[in-house]
Structures are given as C-alpha cells and as structure tokens.
C-alpha cells in the first residue's frame, strides 16, 4: 500500500478512536487527549496536530458544501455539553437549552455511524436552529438540521458526496 493510503487509514482510525473514547466517557476530545503535553513525544504531538488540522478541514468542507454562514452560529463541542447548559450566555431560555440538548444533540449523537468523524455542532445565535454535521467513513458529508418554529421541532437531513480523507 502507498504511504498516502496508510496515512488516510491512520486518520480514519484516529478519528474513530477519539469518537469512541468520547462516546464511552462523554468528555474526551483531542484537547483532553493533549492535556498532558509534557508526556507526549514530539511525534505524538505532531500527529495530534495533524489530526486536528484534518478534522478542521473536514468541518470546513461540510460548511462549504452546505453553504453554512458560520457568523450566524456558535460552535459547540461534544466535550462541552454541560458547559453549554450552565455557562453559555447567548441563549437565555433554559427550556430551549434543554430541548437543544435532549431533543437534538443527544439523539443525533446516538445516530452517528461507526467510522464517522467527530461532529461539527453549530447552534444559531438565537437558539432557533441546530446544525449537526459530520463526515461518514466513505467521505459522504452529512448535515442534520433541527429548527424550532412556533415551539415545534422540525428535523431534516442532507447528504453530499465529499472528499474521502
């Protein structure tokens, strides 16, 4: 196998590992894995940085493919769900915050297919919409949208062929 293919397989495996750990304990992400920086070798640090860059590239591809205007949203990490509930200051309505977490993020998180990257979660600044994007193992970009209209939750999903990473 060519070196490029090994690298691609490694990135997928690293993403799956990070997602699996995150799913298992609910709070791991690359920042958590990087925390004991003094214990990592230079090669490990470089590898984590490269995985983060690839993850950001994948997220940017998703935003571009689905024409998401990031300025209208704030990003939420899976590792910061409780912080979103208690410390964020954009959305003041606790009922909306609870609905976002229990009716949108948690079910979408449970539906993530094996081999997908860590999801990009964007919440509209007024709390009226949640975007949940990820890349499947075959490179397909997926964007799930949940919008609150007159107290009702409307969900939709789109898929587009993306670049396999």
Image (spheres, grey):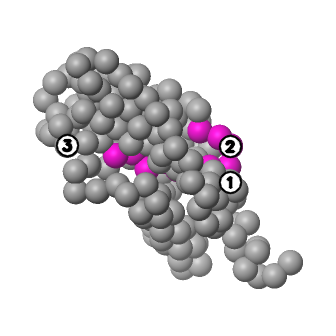
Q: Which residue is identified by label 1? A: 137
Between marks 2 and 1, how big is the CA–CA gap?
Answer: 8 Å
Measuring 62% from the left and 44% from the top, which residue is drawn there? 20
User: Per the image, is 116 magenta?
Assistant: yes
The residue nearer to you, when weighing 3 against 17, is 3
- Label 2, residues with CA under 10 Å away: few <14, some 14-19, many ≥20: few
**Whether residue 36 can be seen here:** no
Q: Is residue 130 visible?
A: yes
Residue at 43% x, 29% y is: 155
Q: How many marks?
A: 3
**Image point (16%, 24%), residue name:** 93
Of labels 2 and 1, earlier in sequence is 2
**Whole-percent x and y of residue 107?**
50, 27
Magenta segment boundaries in residue numbering: 112-122
Residue tagged by mark 2?
Answer: 114
Give whichever of discs 1 and 3 has the lower sequence position. Answer: 3
Furthest residue in direction right, as rendered:
1
Q: Secondary structure at mark 3?
A: loop
The quarter in which the C terminus is drawn is bottom right
In contact (CB < 8 Å): disc 2 and disc 1: yes
Q: Compared with residue 108, is residue 17 higher up or lower down, i.e. above or below?
A: below
Image disc number at residue 125: 3
């Amino acid at each position: 196998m060519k070196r490029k293919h090994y690298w691609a397989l490694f990135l997928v495996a690293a993403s799956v590992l990070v997602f699996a750990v995150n799913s298992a304990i609910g709070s791991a992400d690359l920042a958590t894995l990087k925390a004991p920086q003094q214990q990592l070798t230079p090669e490990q640090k470089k590898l984590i940085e490269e995985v983060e860059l690839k993850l950001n590239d994948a997220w940017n591809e998703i935003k571009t493919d689905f024409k998401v205007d990031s300025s209208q949203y704030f990003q939420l990490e899976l590792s910061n769900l409780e912080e979103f509930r208690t410390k964020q200051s954009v959305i003041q309505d606790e009922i909306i915050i609870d609905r976002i977490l229990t009716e949108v993020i948690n079910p979408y998180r449970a539906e993530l297919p094996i081999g997908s990257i860590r999801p990009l979660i964007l919440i509209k600044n007024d709390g009226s919409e949640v975007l949940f994007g990820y890349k499947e193992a075959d490179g397909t970009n997926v964007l799930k949208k949940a919008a609150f209209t007159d107290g009702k939750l409307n969900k939709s999903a789109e898929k587009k062929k993306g670049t396999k990473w």
